[in-house]
């Protein structure tokens, strides 16, 4: 009996142990399996790195590139996948988040490339400049052509708010957006247009002032007689056409002039500010429009010394009145031209000139040859280049700034050409400057 009891106790103990073991396995096995699976998942994801990178909104375009070219190239080069989070897509002022997926090395490489793109991205600025309202038309141009050209040339965004009230006596605001270089170029192009407007208005104001001072022209005033009696045709041949050059106004001690071309202080050309000098702009514009179309009747076949022709100047697209002064060497197809309204000269191929039509001859030629009176070169008979440069600077050559000129004497050459000996005075500063006197004081010339 005691043995049976011992056996039952042992069996019961064994049964209890088995039960406890089974219960232990049931309770512990799911947790162990989950840990093992988690370890496997961590191992798989550890092969791919995910990097989130915040970038300023203005950099998004540079990172993506045109039609996605930049971001595609980064993905191809680094072997990553790159996309933007859509969280702040609607907010243009908030930073955008880039998600980079790939191996640790490739993701970090892509991140470095993007950071360099952002760091090297040019700083986009917005600057404001103010211009006179009266100059807006010249800056904007016909149908906005000029301002669009400024934007294209500079790659800057140029904006003028034309919805505001226009008051002619206040300055108008122009907003320019771009890099430092783009803004500077746009401002330079706008300044050029402002200078053009300034020159035009300077001419106009002087003309209006002179109109008030002038009396009705007498019948022997050649300037006005030529306006009333247009020439019918261009005469070929050796005539120098000196009778067609604008004459010096009489009855006035000083006249307003522009110095248009300088060879040296003893040979330079001026335009006298009269109503006719304003008409010159109209003549050049009309000629440029007319000769923009090639016509068989305008072609030049034979050219002789002294012939009048229509010609462009160097790289200038406009057309001007010119006289044939000779030929380059023995080549009859290379013409030496003198531009009758400005005093400039250049060589030009015969094929590039045209017959000067009669409708462009009514206005007298505006370039008047002058010599600075009472001075000579400091040493010898020729002018040093440095003196010529200084003289050009003092006379604002081709800058269309008004000087006062006093006629001292007129010399007539055997050819019939007239040279006017003049005194020039610059009245643009606080003090009037006699240019001949200033050259002598600077030891660049001597009195004679």
Image (cartoon, rainbow, N blue to C red):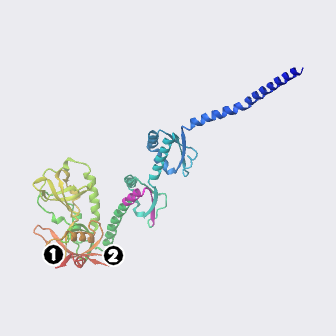
Rate crowding at label 1 as few (under 14), some (14 to 19) or many (20 or more) other CA atoms within 10 Å: few
**Which stretch appears magenta?**
170-189
Identify the image quadrant of residue 150: bottom left
Q: Which residue is mark 1?
A: 379
**Residue 374 seen by the camera:** no
Measuring from the top left, give residue 256's x and y in whole percent.
Answer: 28, 72
Vertical comparison of 251 with 32: above or below: below
In this rendering, which labeled residue sits more in front, label 1 or label 2?
1
Of the numbered discs in the image, which one, if any, rests on residue 119? none
Measuring from the top left, give residue 403's x and y in whole percent.
Answer: 28, 72
Q: Which residue appears at 16% of the width and 51% of the height?
A: 300
Measuring from the top left, give residue 421's x and y in whole percent.
Answer: 18, 74
Measuring from the top left, give residue 284's x and y in whole percent.
Answer: 27, 58
Q: The residue tagged with tag 2: helix, strand or loop? A: loop
In the displayed structure, does residue 93 sit left or right of residue 310? right
Q: CB under 8 Å between callouts 1 and 2?
A: no
Q: Which residue appears at 19% of the width and 49% of the height?
A: 297
Vertical comparison of 340 with 36: above or below: below
Q: Which residue is mark 2?
A: 429
Q: Quadrant of the C terminus?
A: bottom left
In the displayed structure, does residue 129 sit left or right of residue 241? right
Q: The residue tagged with tag 1: helix, strand or loop? A: loop
Q: Quadrant of the N terminus?
A: top right
Q: Which residue appears at 25% of the width and 52% of the height?
A: 291
Rate crowding at label 2 as few (under 14), some (14 to 19) or many (20 or more) other CA atoms within 10 Å: few
**Seen from this angle, which residue lies furthest right?**
1
Q: Pick whichever, 331 or 168, lies toward us.
A: 331
111 falls in the magenta region: no
């Amino acid at each position: 009996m005691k043995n049976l009891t011992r056996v039952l106790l042992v069996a019961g103990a064994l049964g209890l142990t088995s039960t406890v073991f089974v219960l232990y396995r049931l309770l512990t096995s799911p947790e162990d399996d989950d840990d093992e699976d988690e370890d496997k998942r961590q191992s798989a994801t550890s092969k791919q790195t995910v990097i989130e990178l915040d970038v300023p909104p203005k950099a998004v375009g540079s990172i993506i590139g045109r039609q996605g070219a930049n971001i595609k190239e980064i993905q191809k080069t680094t072997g990553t996948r790159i996309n933007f989070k859509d969280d702040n897509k609607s907010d243009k002022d908030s930073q955008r988040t880039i998600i980079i997926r790939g191996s640790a090395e490739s993701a970090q490489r892509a991140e470095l490339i993007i950071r360099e793109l952002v760091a090297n991205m040019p700083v986009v600025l917005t600057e404001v400049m103010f211009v006179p309202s009266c100059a807006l038309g010249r800056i904007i141009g016909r149908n906005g052509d000029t301002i669009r050209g400024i934007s294209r040339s500079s790659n800057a965004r140029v904006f003028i708010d034309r919805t505001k009230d226009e008051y002619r006596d206040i300055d108008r605001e122009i907003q320019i957006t771009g890099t430092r270089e783009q803004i500077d170029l746009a401002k330079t192009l706008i300044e050029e247009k402002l200078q053009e407007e300034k020159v035009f208005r300077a001419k106009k104001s002087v003309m209006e002032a002179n109109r008030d001072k002038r009396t009705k022209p007498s019948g022997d005033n050649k300037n006005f007689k030529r306006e009333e009696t247009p020439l019918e045709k261009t005469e070929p041949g050796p005539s120098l056409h000196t009778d067609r050059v604008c004459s010096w106004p009489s009855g006035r001690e000083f006249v307003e002039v522009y110095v248009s071309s300088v060879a040296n202080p003893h040979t330079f050309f001026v335009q006298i500010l009269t109503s006719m000098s304003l008409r010159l702009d109209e003549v050049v514009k009309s000629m440029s429009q007319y000769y923009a179309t090639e016509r068989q009747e305008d072609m030049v076949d034979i050219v002789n010394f002294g012939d009048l022709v229509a010609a462009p100047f160097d790289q200038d697209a406009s057309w001007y009145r010119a006289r044939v002064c000779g030929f380059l060497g023995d080549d009859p197809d290379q013409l030496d031209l003198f531009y009758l309204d400005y005093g400039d000269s250049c060589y030009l191929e015969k094929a590039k000139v045209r017959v000067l039509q009669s409708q462009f001859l009514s206005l007298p030629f505006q370039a008047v040859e002058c010599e600075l009176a009472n001075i000579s070169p400091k040493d010898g008979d020729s002018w040093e280049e440095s003196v010529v440069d200084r003289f050009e600077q003092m006379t604002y050559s081709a800058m269309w700034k008004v000087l006062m000129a006093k006629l001292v004497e007129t010399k007539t050459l055997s050819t019939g050409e007239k040279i006017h000996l003049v005194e020039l005075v610059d009245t643009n500063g606080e003090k009037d400057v006699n240019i001949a006197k200033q050259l002598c004081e600077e030891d660049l010339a001597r009195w004679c």
